[in-house]
């Protein structure tokens, strides 16, 4: 059986010195729920400054890594 997960896109906005930027992080969850811990882990995975703020969380669907387009661990 294929390992299907619930995929989410986390979008952050940040300001670093004289520039403003955005960054996204995609992750697959075993359960179809997003917790504060998940948000903190996604923010940490982006390597963004501490002042980065979460702008949105988008549900992408339930699928395997291959279906989502991730072909590596």
Image (spheres, helix red, strand yellow):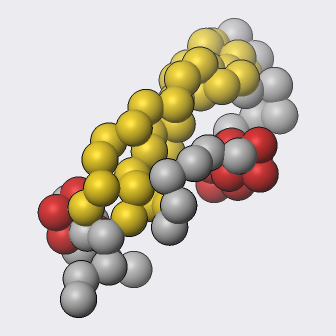
**Where is the N terminus found, in terms of image quarters?**
bottom left
Query: Where does the image place residue 72, in percent across and percent down from the top left?
Result: 31, 77
Location of residue 65 with respect to 37 vertically, above or below:
below
Image quarter (top left, top right, bottom left or bottom right) of the C terminus = bottom left
Residue most toward the right? 50
Name the image quarter holding residue 41. bottom right
Q: Is residue 15 something one can see in this rendering?
A: yes
- Above or below for 24 versus 73: above
**Residue at 31%, 70% in the rendered image:** 4
Query: Eyeballing the image, is 45 above or below 65?
Result: above
Residue drawn at the location 59% of the way across and 27% of the way down: 12
Question: Looking at the picture, does residue 10 appear above or below residue 6?
Answer: above
Q: Could you say where residue 55 lies in the image, as x and y percent from the top left? A: 59, 19
Q: Is residue 26 visible?
A: no
Q: Residue furthest bottom?
A: 1
Does residue 7 appear left or right of residue 49 in this picture? left
The percent position of residue 48, horizontal first and vertical second, equals 68, 39
């Amino acid at each position: 059986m294929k390992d299907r997960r619930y995929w989410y896109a986390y979008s952050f906005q940040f300001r670093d010195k004289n520039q403003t930027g955005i960054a996204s992080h995609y992750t697959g969850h075993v359960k179809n729920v997003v917790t504060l811990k998940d948000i903190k882990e996604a923010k940490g995975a982006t390597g963004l400054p501490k002042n980065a703020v979460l702008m949105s969380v988008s549900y992408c669907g339930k699928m395997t890594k291959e279906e989502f387009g991730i072909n590596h661990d």
